[in-house]
Amino acid sequence: QVQLVESGGGVVQPGRSLRLSCAASGFTFSSYAMHWVRQAPGKGLEWVAVISHDGSNKDHADSVRGRFTISRDNSKNTLYMEMNSLRAEDTAFYYCARDRRDILTGYYDDWGQGTLVTVSS
Amino acid sequence: SSKLTQDPAVSVALGQTVRITCQGDSLRSFYASWYQQKPGQAPVLVISGKNNRPSGIPDRFSGSNSGNTASLTITGAQAEDEADYYCNSRDSIANLIVVFGGGTKLTVL
């Protein structure tokens, strides 16, 4: 049974940093591309970043490029999101999602339950 | 990057058929996938690709595509289908970008 468990969310001041983690189990983590998707409270889904199965390819949404960095450690079955220079508009639930293949398809067969990041002074 | 457009809200009478649409240039190149999200829960995939349903998704859910429009049809809507529905696809301009529609709130009357 696939499980994705996010952690690392919390309240942080504007301009500070935070690192999110997503612990994966129930599947061969190193065989799948992974994504972060966020959702501001009461708003729609926004794609944030993708990383290929081996970490060799990655990309980020324009809204976070240069501030957020996606990474993974296949030896630990864990996905990460390093978030720097946080802004109030980054406040959202952050979900990790498993892609269907080793490279990006955009089909998310599995999602975590999300972790809430609140950027506030 | 590309943009996907959805109607913000749609309603359907119990047992009737409803179609939720998603429009965007990227859909000329890539199939959409559709996600159902109920309050306080993570999204769930209901349709992907041409018209593929994951196991556990009722067969009243189906997908179709024409030109720049993808559609999710619920045939015989049930009360438990009331939820937000989102489409997404790969971006047709940037190779590794994904785009989501703004979402459609479905109300079952």
Image (cartoon, coloured by chain):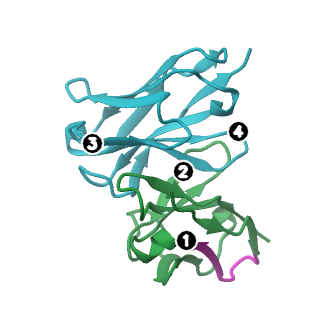
Query: Which chain is green in the picture?
Result: B
Q: Is residue A80 above or below residue B12?
A: above
What kind of element bears circle 3? loop
Q: Chain of mark 2?
A: B
Q: Neighbour class for label 3 at 10 Å: few (<14), some, many (≥20)? A: some
Residue B92 image position (x, y, % from top left): 42, 65
Residue A116 image position (x, y, % from top left): 60, 28
Give the label on residue B24, or none.
1
Residue linked to disc 4: A41
Amino acid type, mark 1: Gly
Give the label on residue A57, or none.
3
Task: Name the image quarter holding the C terminus of chain B.
Answer: bottom right
Q: Is residue A81 left or right of residue A74?
A: right
The answer for how far apart the CA atoms under marks 1 and 2 are is 21 Å
In terms of depth relative to the viewer, which is nearer, B40 or B24? Answer: B24
Amino acid type, mark 4: Pro
Q: Chain of mark 4?
A: A
Q: Please report the bounds of the magenta region as a residue range.
A: B12-24
The answer for how far apart the CA atoms under marks 2 and 3 are is 25 Å
What kind of element bears circle 4? loop
Residue linked to disc 2: B43
Amino acid type, mark 3: Asn
Q: Neighbour class for label 4 at 10 Å: few (<14), some, many (≥20)? A: few
Give the colour of chain A. cyan
Q: Is residue A112 above or below residue B31?
A: above
* Contact, mark 4 vs mark 3 (Cβ under 8 Å): no
Residue B86 image position (x, y, % from top left): 58, 60
In the rendered image, is residue A23 in sight? no
